[in-house]
Amino acid sequence: MRIASRAVAVASAALLAAGGATLTAAPSAAAVSIPSKCQYQWYNPHKAKTTTSVHLRTGPSTGYTSLGILSKGTKFTHYCVAYPNGSNWAWGKVTSGANAGKTGWVYYNYLTH
């Protein structure tokens, strides 16, 4: 563990001395801009997969525009939920498949943890 830390420090110093790229830490969950429609925000993001093909939407209901279809098994990290009209919707980021990197809403019942 200590050797790995030292190797990272040496590599970082070499990059900076050579005028290379700066190293930054990965963004935290807090860095994600949570939409105002969220009614409950998780303390830690939840990693899930879709249980069937499902639309990624711009808002928490089928009345919102689809941003694409997530196929069964697509990885989705969700940060919060909303409960419009008694239904459960999760907002988060697609982390695998054709829509990887997109954020939007997925019907919660189509996610498994």
Image: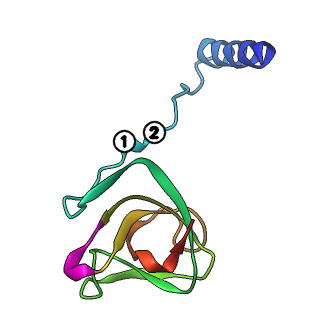
Locate the C terminus and report the quarter of the image it occupies. bottom right
- Was residue 24 drawn as part of the magenta stretch in this picture? no
Above or below residue 41? Residue 107 is below
Q: Which mark is residue 27?
A: 2
In percent of the image, x 34 and y 73: which residue is there?
89
Horizontal side of residue 25 vs 4, given as left or right = left
The secondary structure making up most of the magenta span is helix
Q: Quadrant of residue 75?
A: bottom right
The magenta stretch spans residue 85: yes
The residue at 55%/65% (across/down) is 48
Does 20 sit above or below residue 102? above
Which residue is rendered at x = 74% and y = 12% of the image?
Answer: 6
Q: Position of residue 59 (x, y in %)?
A: 27, 74
Figure quadrant of residue 11 = top right
Residue 111: x and y, percent? 51, 74
Mark 1: secondary structure: helix
Magenta span of residues = 82-86
